[in-house]
Amino acid sequence: MSMPQEGQSASSRTPAAARAATGTTLDDYTDRYARRVQGMTASEIRALFAVASRPEVVSLAGGAPYVAALPLDAVGEMLTRLVVEHGPTSLQYGIGQGTLELRERICEVMALSGIDVSSGASPEDVVVTVGGQQALDLVARLFLDPGDVVLAEGPTYVGALGVFQSAQAQVVHVPMDDDGLIPEALEQAIADVARSGRRAKFLYTIPTYQNPAGVTLTEDRRERVLDICERAGLLVVEDDPYGQLGFEGEAPAPLRARRRDGVFYLSTFSKTFAPGLRVGWILAPHAVREKLVIATEAQVLCPSAFAQAAITGYLSTMPWQEQLKTYRELYRERRDALLTALEDLMPPGITWTRPAGGLFVWATLSDGLDAKAMMPRAINARVAYVPGTGFFADGSGRENLRLNFSFPPPERIREGVRRLASVIEQEMALRKVFGAAAVRPAGTGTGAWRAGGGADAPGPDLA
Ligand SMILES: Cc1ncc(COP(=O)(O)O)c(C=O)c1O
């Protein structure tokens, strides 16, 4: 292959030739990307996470369930039978909507939290997806045009921010407190968006054991939020991966159990069974289901037949409710270990949420400390967390960090908090001596976990 001559434009060279000519690893495709790719940037924190996965680092940063607690031998035998006895179907293509058998099992799972026949749930209206993530992407494909507004809790799930950004939608955060989304703030946000001449299409919400804040929308607020959305003609996208992982009795019934119209219910087996199988689902209003199936066929043809058969086998032949109990007990013990360690070891002024379920605690620093700027020092001290900025589309969250308790065992959690507390104490001491510039990059505002205080727009960091 001949080398391009000097002066030849980058776009007329092959990318490899352009790289060879410039001797760089820079992205030669820059001028060819679609507009939606703008802003798809990997955060600098991603680089730190490569270091954070080293064994000497206590990682409170992940969001992974503790799958080692599964009865792996029994699961293995079930999977073997799927191939040996049912290979011709389990290894074959399937239909876009997902198998009827799995959709029936999914309805049984949803019925446990009150989404049942009386609330209009039927296998007909369930679409099986490749994890909860594809469910989110499908809803975005169906409803979002570039420039549309999505209302979402501040902070919210980082993977949802990525989906909305790809759809070129704009996220407007609605503040939360310890009781979840604040209804008055939702009304205010709806009014503000309308006043600005933009169009809000839906509210994206994780009402139960929220990721990343760990808080749960109270019973009373659930009704108010639904009423507000109904009055404003706003669809509700309810994301519920954690609802069955409560440690303190039953969670309030999902929004979908209260209203059948205008609510999309998304969930997944990633946190209650295993994320490696990548199976989630949407329960959609009947009129929309066909469009969802067309959209999913365009994306993935059909969800994995093998993964669906594995979930169906798990739900039909194994004691999955016992396993849920095992997960809950394990995570309750780890949540308690985290809360106790925070109580015992954190310096005064630092606050955190007290989740009644799920996988995460959300902490707030004081004195204008910056969790993102502090991250390299934390990694150096062999502890990792996710800085709060990853969970906001508007740069808020500098004072916050998300701490995971599902994966590390209790003694590692305590050791992680001990290391983190010592890093925070050092930051506080630095600030006392040298002022804010010592702990916060120049030009950044004081972020609060209640959205709206941010100055930069970093794009999502990590799930
Ligand atoms: C709120 C929320 N929605 C969706 C997902 C995606 O789940 P899945 O692994 O099933 O794609 C996650 C994963 O962490 C999540 O926290």
Image: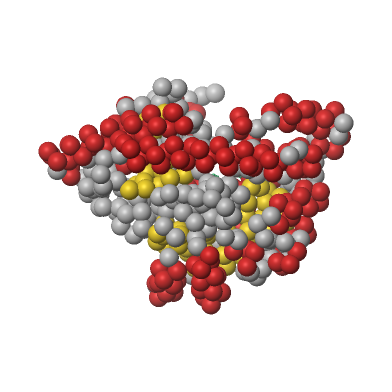
Q: Would residue 74 appear left or right of 9 to someone viewing this image?
A: right
Asked if one can make out residue 226 in the rendered structure from this viewpoint, the answer is yes
Colour scheme: secondary structure
Which residue reaches farthest left? 433
Judge by depth and name the residue closer to the eye, 374 or 460. 374
Where, by quadrant of the figure, is residue 288 drawn?
Answer: bottom right
Judge by depth and name the residue closer to the eye, 430 or 393. 430
Q: Position of residue 65 (x, y in %)?
A: 56, 37
Q: Would residue 115 appear left or right of 149 to someone viewing this image?
A: right
Q: Would residue 257 appear left or right of 214 to someone viewing this image?
A: right
Where, by quadrant of the figure, is residue 271 drawn?
Answer: top right
Q: Position of residue 366 (x, y in %)?
A: 26, 47
Q: Quadrant of the N terminus?
A: top right
Which residue reaches farthest bottom? 231
Judge by depth and name the residue closer to the eye, 382 or 297. 382
Q: Check the image and report above or below for 131 versus 222.
A: above
> At 59% across and 64% down in the image, what residue appears?
255
Asked if one can make out residue 44 in the rendered structure from this viewpoint, the answer is no
> At 57% across and 34% down in the image, what residue appears?
66
> At 60% across and 39% down in the image, what residue appears?
327
Where, by quadrant of the figure, is residue 336 drawn?
Answer: top left
Q: How many marks?
A: 0
Q: Position of residue 332 (x, y in %)?
A: 52, 41
Q: Position of residue 341 (x, y in %)?
A: 37, 37
> At 17% across and 36% down in the image, what residue appears?
430
Q: Check the image and report above or below for 456 versus 461.
A: below
Q: Check the image and report above or below for 303 versus 189.
A: above
